[in-house]
Image (spheres, rainbow, N blue to C red):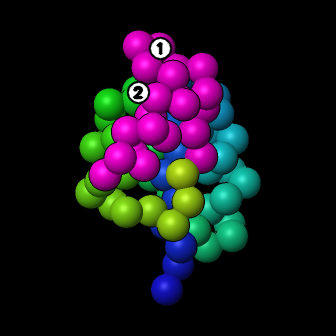
Amino acid sequence: MPHVVLAIDDSPDVHRLLDARLRPEGLILHHALEADEGLTKARELKPDLILLDVDLPLMTGFEVCQKLKLE
């Protein structure tokens, strides 16, 4: 079964790069451009790995981590 990866980053360029690099590895890659969207997707998908930008608008990546740890 392929591993599920969630990328949370506000840069569409980063998402395109991750697509190009990780999809050939057989990973299922999901994207979120905002912290709140990323939190929702993390709760729904329960990914094997989350690639998280630290410098997000409105909420830092550290805050996202803290919220995920509390659940």
> Which of the labelled discs sits on residue 57, or is there none?
1
Residue holding disc 2? 34
Q: Indicate the position of residue 51 as horizontal and vertical percent values.
A: 59, 46
Name the residue at 41% across, 27% down.
34
Q: How many marks?
A: 2
Asked whether residue 55 is in view, the answer is yes
Name the residue at 60% across, 20% down.
55
Distance of label 1 from label 2 (alpha carbons): 7 Å
Residue type of the residue flagged with mark 2: Glu
Q: Indicate the position of residue 49 as horizontal and vertical percent values.
A: 56, 60
Q: Look at the picture and state if 4 lies above or below 12.
A: below
Q: Residues within 10 Å of mark 1 (few under 14, many from 20)?
A: few
Q: Secondary structure at mark 1?
A: loop
**Contact, mark 1 vs mark 2 (Cβ under 8 Å):** yes
| Residue closest to the eye, 65 or 10 | 65
Q: Secondary structure at mark 2?
A: loop
Look at the image and give the residue range highlighted in magenta. Answer: 51-71
| Residue closest to the eye, 36 or 62 | 62
Name the residue at 35% across, 47% down.
70
Relative to residue 67, is residue 22 drawn left or right?
right
